[in-house]
Amino acid sequence: MEHKLILCQTIKDTIDNANPNALSAWATKGYSSPADLLIKIKDRLNLYNSKLNISDIEVRSTVEVYGSSCNYLGLIESVEDKPQIKAYVFFTQPVVGSRSAFFEQQFFPVISSVIENGISSNEYHLTNRPVYIVNINTDNMTPSMALSVYSGKVVGFHIIDMMDNDVNSILLSVGYDTNKQSITEFDKLITNISVSRPKANNFFDLDCASKRITYKDQKFRDKSGALKTTLTNEPYWFMLRSLAALYLVDKEGYSFDVSSLTVLSSNKSLGAFVKYVKKIGG
């Protein structure tokens, strides 16, 4: 069956209007123009999964999933009278210049809606359709950015890196071997690349003796220690690493504690996260 790649207009505009530095970086990878980059993204998706059989690219003014949209959302749809969504596709920005803005804050408003929609289903997958993340970012990939990519892989996202970054080598340079997954090493990795002083894992605590992971609310507190009354991007930065930790500890037979987040579950993203953890944890 043939499929087509659907782009929202903002993705097309972002790529078409990329700054000279991004255009130059793309050129070094063999993408001679923004149009050529899009064609080669289609080709790379087909190479990654031949069943996608994407034959065309279509641009729409808006793309929405379960009432949510973002500037970097695309879809893979079947080509038929009544098209069906086969996968969600997210694009990184050509340039971000900020580790925290790599992709979490752009994607997770939509992914949270997808998670929420599936809570009542009998499936335990994070999303009801495959998620492809197409990296077109031209910044030098830092360990923090590499951790985001790796975390995405852990939770099952398909990474199409048009810049061919060696995530495994980047993380190995800070002491984490992606071929030897474990929650204790993941905990050390998060701590090692932390920008806080002293370095700390502000996402979760591990009790290895009793095999229990306790999620923390530290990222949602202000300098006085009080819970923030308004949350902006904090839940999105929290979710990806925390979901990756969930998948790692689930393989190792840990139990879960999200009690500190319950009071924050009125937030759409944190609410979806808490519900999903409880679903997985029984």
Image: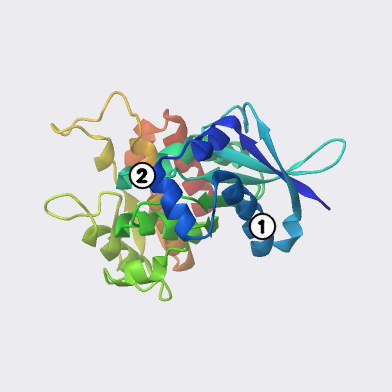
- The correct choice, above or below, for 208 with respect to 41 in the image is below
Residue drawn at 46 percent across, 42 percent down: 273
- The correct choice, above or below, for 146 with respect to 70 in the image is below
Along the viewing direction, whichever of 22 and 237 lies nearer the viewer: 22
For residue 271, what is the image quadrant? Answer: top left
Q: Secondary structure at mark 1?
A: helix
- The correct choice, above or below, for 268 with respect to 43 in the image is above
Residue drawn at 62 percent across, 44 percent down: 88
**Circle 1 is placed at which residue position?**
43
- Where does residue 145 sit, x and y in percent of width and height? 36, 54
**Circle 2 is placed at which residue position?**
238
Along the viewing direction, whichever of 118 and 166 lies nearer the viewer: 166
Work out whether mark 2 precedes mark 1 in sequence or the reverse, and give the earlier one.
Answer: 1
Label 1 Cα crowd, 10 Å radius (few <14 / some 14-19 / many 20+): some
- Where does residue 192 sit, x and y in percent of width and height? 22, 62
Residue drawn at 16 percent across, 34 percent down: 225
Indicate left or right for 74 with 273 as reference. Answer: right
